[in-house]
């Protein structure tokens, strides 16, 4: 995969429109709103990473801050061009995103939510966890109602993730998304 590179979008703004079109081909949204969001990419968080092959954008992943977990981030809008799926590009992009988080952002965990791609992420080493909020409020509480922080938990050797919501009797879960995490 030598011809591939993963770069932060703000380092190469010429890929902005192509990246916007790729994401919108999967999750339709106004181009203006999408571009505005992509323009927020920066050296800190949020960061949009693009996967470039032969000078074309074929993949994207956005790293977003989690207000209550400073030592981690949330990855979202992971997408590979439809015609190139199933060839290992998604795995390559996630591996590079993890390296960026660990080596450049100095983070120790990645969180995400998915509805349908659980197997893809579990093959990459992600495990299921309780819900995470990226909207300011504490993401989850420990038993004594203190905010759980990944780094603190690792250091204290206590479970990283909160308990999963209970399953209802017929096996269907009460949640609509699966939250997952990976320690880096
Ligand atoms: N179900 C089961 N297995 C899967 C799936 C799936 N939906 N997708 C990939 N895999 C498996 C592959 O078979 C492969 O297994 P192998 O290593 O045993 O051969 C492994 O996962 C790696 O697959 P890749 O080829 O690296 O994955 P790909 O390049 O297709 O990228 C992705 C995966 C990003 C999910 C792509 O299919 C895609 O863009 N899907 C549409 C958008 C989407 O749903 N994105 C995820 C949203 S969730 C989020 O952003 C956090």
Image (tube, rainbow, N blue to C red):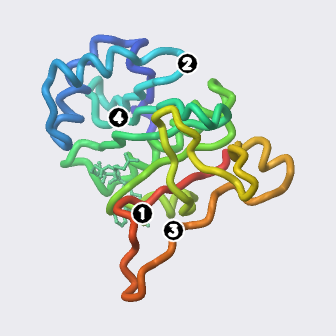
Q: Earlier in the sequence, mark 4 or mark 3?
A: 4
Q: Are marks 3 and 2 in contact (CB under 8 Å)?
A: no
Question: How many discs appear?
Answer: 4
Badge 3 element: loop
Please tell me whether mark 4 or mark 1 is closer to you in this view: 1
Which sits in the foreground, 8 or 45?
Answer: 45
Q: Position of residue 127 (x, y in %)?
A: 57, 62
Which sits in the foreground, 54 or 170?
Answer: 170
Q: Position of residue 75 (x, y in %)?
A: 46, 40
Q: Residue at x 29, y 23 (%)?
A: 55
Q: Earlier in the sequence, mark 3 or mark 2?
A: 2
What's the distance in space between the residues labelled 3 and 2, CA to CA? Answer: 32 Å
What's the distance in space between the residues labelled 1 and 3, CA to CA? Answer: 17 Å
Q: Are marks 4 and 3 in contact (CB under 8 Å)?
A: no
Q: Residue at x 51, y 32 (%)?
A: 136
Badge 2 element: loop
Q: Are marks 1 and 3 in contact (CB under 8 Å)?
A: no
Residue sitting at the far front: 145
Q: Which residue is mark 3?
A: 165
Q: Of the numbered discs in the image, which one, if any, rests on residue 44? A: 2
Q: Quadrant of residue 168?
A: bottom left
Q: Earlier in the sequence, mark 4 or mark 2?
A: 2
What's the distance in space between the residues labelled 4 and 1, CA to CA? Answer: 18 Å
What's the distance in space between the residues labelled 4 and 3, CA to CA? Answer: 30 Å
Quadrant for the N terminus in the image: top left
Q: Are marks 4 and 1 in contact (CB under 8 Å)?
A: no
């Amino acid at each position: 995969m030598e011809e591939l590179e993963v770069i932060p979008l703000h380092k190469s703004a010429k890929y902005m429109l192509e990246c916007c079109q790729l994401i919108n081909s999967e999750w339709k949204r106004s181009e203006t709103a999408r571009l505005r969001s992509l323009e927020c990419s920066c050296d800190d968080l949020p960061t949009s990473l693009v996967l470039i092959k032969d000078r074309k954008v074929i993949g994207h992943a956005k790293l977003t801050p989690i207000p209550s977990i400073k030592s981690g981030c949330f990855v979202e809008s992971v997408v590979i061009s439809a015609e190139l799926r199933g060839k290992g590009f998604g795995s390559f992009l996630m591996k590079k995103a993890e390296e960026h988080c660990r080596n450049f952002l100095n983070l120790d965990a990645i969180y995400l939510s998915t509805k349908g791609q659980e197997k893809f992420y579990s093959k990459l080493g992600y495990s299921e966890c309780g819900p995470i909020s990226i909207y300011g409020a504490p993401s989850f509480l420990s038993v004594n109602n203190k905010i759980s922080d990944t780094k603190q938990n690792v250091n204290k050797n206590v479970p990283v993730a909160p308990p999963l919501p209970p399953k209802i009797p017929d096996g269907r879960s009460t949640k609509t998304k699966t939250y997952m995490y990976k320690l880096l």
